[in-house]
Every structure is written in C-alpha cells, then in structure tokens.
C-alpha cells in the first residue's frame, strides 16, 4: 500500500509534466489543426537554456527558470513566424504545416547538438530531498513539479476562460475565419498561442530535465504527451490533462510493480486498448480528420 | 447621384479564384444611411463581393474605398474602421454562450461600459436573445441564430453593416421579423446597410437602391421599385413571366 501511494504521487508529478506538453500540442491543434512537431524541440531548448543559466552564469534556479521561459517564448514565436505564418496565410494544407514543423524540430535539435553536444547532463540543481507522510516518502522535487505544473495550467485556464484575448482564442479554435470577421487579429492570436506553448515547453523541459537528464533529443518524451492527448481526445485541453494524469500514474505503477524496462510497452498497450474501446479517446468528440 | 461622397465605393473590381474570374469589373457605391441590395442567382458572385469588402478575400484589380480611404488589407482592421459582415449561414460560435458570442462582436472595442450599453440595445432589438443569454449558441433555432448573428455584428457599432443572405433557411415569419429589424436599424439609427439576397422580391421591397449581379457582372442598377417592375428582373429573379 505504501509503495502504491508513493508511486501514485510520483505518477501525478510526471502526469503533470505530461499535461503541460499535451496541452501545448492540444492548444495549437485546436486552432490550426496540425501537430506542432517543433514543440518537443522547444522543450529541449528550454531545458538547455535553464541548464546553462545555472551552470555557466551561476544564476539562482528561479532566475534561470524565468530566463529559460522568456527564451523559449522567443523561440516558439519566431518558429511560428518563420516556419508557419507564410503557410498559414496562403492557406496551405496542414500536411505542409506538419512537414515544416518537423523541419523546425530537426533544425533546433541539431543546433542544440552543435552548440552543446549530445551527451546527457545532470541538471545542476541540488537535491532537495524527500519528506514523509506516515510510511510514504515523497520527493520534494516531484511535489514542486506537480504544484508548478498545475499552477501554470490553472493560469492558462483563467486566461482562456476569464479574459478577452482568451475568448478570442476560443473563438478562433471554433471558427478562425468568423473570428477574423469579429475583428480578431489572427496573427496576434498566433503570437499568443505560440508564446503560451513556449511557457509550457520550458516549464516541462526544466522539470523533466531535473527528473531525468538534459540532452538535445530529450523532447522525444513528448511522444508520451501525444499518447496522453490521444487517450484523452485530441484537440481538447481538459482531455489532454485527464489523459496525461492517467498515463503518468499508469507508468509509475508499472515501473514500481512490474519493471521500468517495460514501462513504455505498457504506455503503448494502454493507447491501443483505449483506442479499441474509445476510438475518439476518452473524452473526444470526432475522429475524422485528426492525426 | 447625391452630392455627398459615398461611404463605400467599389470601382472596376476584379476578383479571381485561381484562374476563375468571380467578379468582373464590378462597380457600386453605398451612400450614408442607404440600404443597398445586391441580388442575383446562386454563384453570381454575391458572397465573393461581401468577402472582398470584408477583406477576407483578396481582389486582383480595381479599388475599394471606404470613407474616402482605400480599404485595409486585414479583416480586423476593416472591422475597426467600421465595416462588419454578417456571414452567410450565420456562423455562430456554437459551443459559446449567446453572451460570449455577443461579446466577441465587440472584440475591437475596449470601452466596457459602452459595450454593456450596446448589448442592452441589441437585447432590446432582439428580446429573444435575452431569454437565451446563457444558452449555448448552437442550441438556438435558425431564426434566433440569425438574430444573434446580426446582434453580434451590431456589437461592433458598425458604420456599414453587411448582410450575406439574411433570409437563408429561415421560415417566412422569421424572415419578416428579420427584415423589420433591418428596416428599423436603418430608419431609427441611420445605419447604412449593404445586403445580398437570393430572395429578390424581399430585398427589392426593402432597399433604397439595388444592383443585379449576374455571373460576376453588374447587369442592372436602379432603385428598388424600378427593378421590381422591370420585365427582365421579374422573369429572371422574381419568377414572374408575362403580364
């Protein structure tokens, strides 16, 4: 029972990181109908920026995190401007957007490789240890990752559902053409959405880097976020969070009770089983035209 | 021709979809406080004309002037300048509430109190919307959705309101209510209106002047009464022959 609780807490923490990533995909997908493959490169980029802010400039963790977030926003917004905007304005098929996204991903990951090298690095943050609740001992960093991640998601929720630009983004996700007839500036919406993905990717990158390691291809973990958003139902933000939490908890339980070697096997198995019974994901509405 | 400068002036407009010419040398003007109708059959280019004036469709050549200035290239700037289009098929944001739909209409305005006042005016014009204020837009009937679409457009306080097929798919009694509201907006508030309609007799009854659009060309223009009595209009668009 203690092991179970411990694994669940750890699962919630990793699930929270997956949530950030899954929401980042879902947000872009909901408005532009394409999968932003460059997103996982933003994550690695964010982790590297925090890593170097600490290891080379000896900045405190929080300062490094904020710098990393700002740089990741810059990276995400310029990717949108360079790789997606002209395609979007020409109403290019979404396949072209995805190919462009893959190109952006390769470019960013390889630049990270070129400048920083491909080796795994331990994130330079001191171990803040564990605390115990009864028989259960929980990593403080896990709790912090969970709290910050949910905090970021909460802020995003408030932004989307309680502010005017948020309403504009929701309208754009329903019908982008009519949104522009309302006087909503599509380019401004794109700027905000990609800035948000920058924040999400950077926060996820930092905590994932702390939990495992920092390396240029660390963004490959976003495949889990993809699984999570498909399990939840593509294009919906709450569904992405639900899918992520389920996947995170499942993974840590498998790692705890069976073997961490088979963890990913179970993740994919989970996906297959869910899709067999819920072809649109647990909370999804329609499966047509989705990737 | 009135001495005042037109609010909207379209000159020799050409619009293409790929290689296909959808509008061919179209010229028209709308004066302040007029109701102008553009009538024509399916595929004549009516919606294209509306979309081009709303800047969601580019034009190949010709010019569009609004209040003496060239039309802006971005749809949101056109809305800010005072042209609002009620799109064909209403295009309500179905998952959003009626209130949110209305607020989106006022997206370009930042004066909260005045926005609240405009909403009050819109709800007075269409009391049905008040009853449905917190319902999802998608749960409204066709007629209510059309009221919402018009109300949403009014939220931007347009100088020129454009309506694309406001009668499409509505029951006759609802159409009457709709057109009464349009007339009232024009007479009481002096709102300038440009509308396109397949339902020619309805549009011609209501408008001050009208243009007939046929396969991308303006083939006739005149005041509503004149066109209603014109033999060619009667046989082609009103389905009345002989007499």
Image: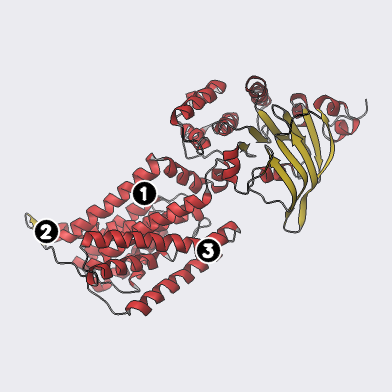
Chain for mark 2? A
Chain for mark 1? A
Mark 3, Cα crowd under 10 Å, few <14 / some 14-19 / many 20+, is: many
Residue at the image point whose x is 84% and y is 29% from the top: B227
- Residue A268 visible at all: no
Q: Viewer-proximal residue, A37 or B222? A: B222
Disc assigned to residue A2: 2
Q: Earlier in the sequence, mark 3 or mark 1?
A: 3
Kindly indicate the quadrant of the structure image that contains residue B235: top right
Q: Earlier in the sequence, mark 3 or mark 2?
A: 2
Q: Viewer-proximal residue, B47 or B243? A: B47
Which residue has dot 3 on it?
A: A97
Which residue has dot 1 on it?
A: A238
Residue at the image point whose x is 53% and y is 63% from the top: A97
Chain for mark 3? A
Q: Position of residue B212 (x, y in %)?
A: 81, 37
């Amino acid at each position: 029972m203690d092991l179970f609780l411990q694994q669940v807490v750890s699962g919630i923490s990793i699930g929270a990181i997956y949530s950030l990533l899954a929401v980042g995909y879902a947000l872009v997908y909901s408005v532009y109908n394409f999968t932003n493959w460059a997103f996982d490169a933003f994550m690695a980029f964010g982790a590297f920026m925090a890593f170097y802010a600490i290891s080379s400039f000896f900045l405190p963790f929080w300062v490094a995190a904020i710098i990393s977030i700002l740089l990741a926003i810059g990276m995400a917004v310029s990717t949108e401007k360079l790789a997606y905007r002209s395609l979007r304005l020409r109403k290019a098929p979404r396949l072209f957007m995805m190919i462009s996204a893959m190109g952006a991903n390769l470019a960013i990951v390889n630049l990270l490789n070129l400048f920083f090298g491909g080796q795994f690095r331990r994130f330079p943050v001191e171990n803040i240890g564990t605390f115990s609740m009864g028989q259960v001992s929980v990593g403080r960093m896990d709790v912090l990752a969970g709290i910050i991640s949910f905090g970021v998601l909460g802020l995003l929720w408030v932004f989307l559902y309680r502010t005017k630009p948020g309403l504009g983004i929701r309208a754009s996700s329903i019908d982008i053409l009519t949104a522009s007839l309302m006087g909503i500036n599509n380019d401004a919406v794109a700027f905000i959405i990609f800035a948000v993905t920058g924040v999400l990717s950077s926060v996820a990158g930092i905590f994932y880097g702390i939990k495992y390691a920092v390396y240029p291809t660390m963004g490959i973990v976003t495949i889990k976020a993809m699984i999570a958003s498909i399990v939840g139902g593509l294009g919906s933000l709450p569904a992405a969070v639900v899918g992520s939490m389920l996947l995170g908890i499942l993974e840590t339980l498998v790692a705890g009770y069976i073997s961490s070697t088979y963890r990913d096997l179970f993740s994919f198995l989970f996906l297959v089983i869910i899709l067999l019974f819920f072809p649109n994901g647990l909370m999804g509405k329609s499966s047509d035209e989705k990737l | 021709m009135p001495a005042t400068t037109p609010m909207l002036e379209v000159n020799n407009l050409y619009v293409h979809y790929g290689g296909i010419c959808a509008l061919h040398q179209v010229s028209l003007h709308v004066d302040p406080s007029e109701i102008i109708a553009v009538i024509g059959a399916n595929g004549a280019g009516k919606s294209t004309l509306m979309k081009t004036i709303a800047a969601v469709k580019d034009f190949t050549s010709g010019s569009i002037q609004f209040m003496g200035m060239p039309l802006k290239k971005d749809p949101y700037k056109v809305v800010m300048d005072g042209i609002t289009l009620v799109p064909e098929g209403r295009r309500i944001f179905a998952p959003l509430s009626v209130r949110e739909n209305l607020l989106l209409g006022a997206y370009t305005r930042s004066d909260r109190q005045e926005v609240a006042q405009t909403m009050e005016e819109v709800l007075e014009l269409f009391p049905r919307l008040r009853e449905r204020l917190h319902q999802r837009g998608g749960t409204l009937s066709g007629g209510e959705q059309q009221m919402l679409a018009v109300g949403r457009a009014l939220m931007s306080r347009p100088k020129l309101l454009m309506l694309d097929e406001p009668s499409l798919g509505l029951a006759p009694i609802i159409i009457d209510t709709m057109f009464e509201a349009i007339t009232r907006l024009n007479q009481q508030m002096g709102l300038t209106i440009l509308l396109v309609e397949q339902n020619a007799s309805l549009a011609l009854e209501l408008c001050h002047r009208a243009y007939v659009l046929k396969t991308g060309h303006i083939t006739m223009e005149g005041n509503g009464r004149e066109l209603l009595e014109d033999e060619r209009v009667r046989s082609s668009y009103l389905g009345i022959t002989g007499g």
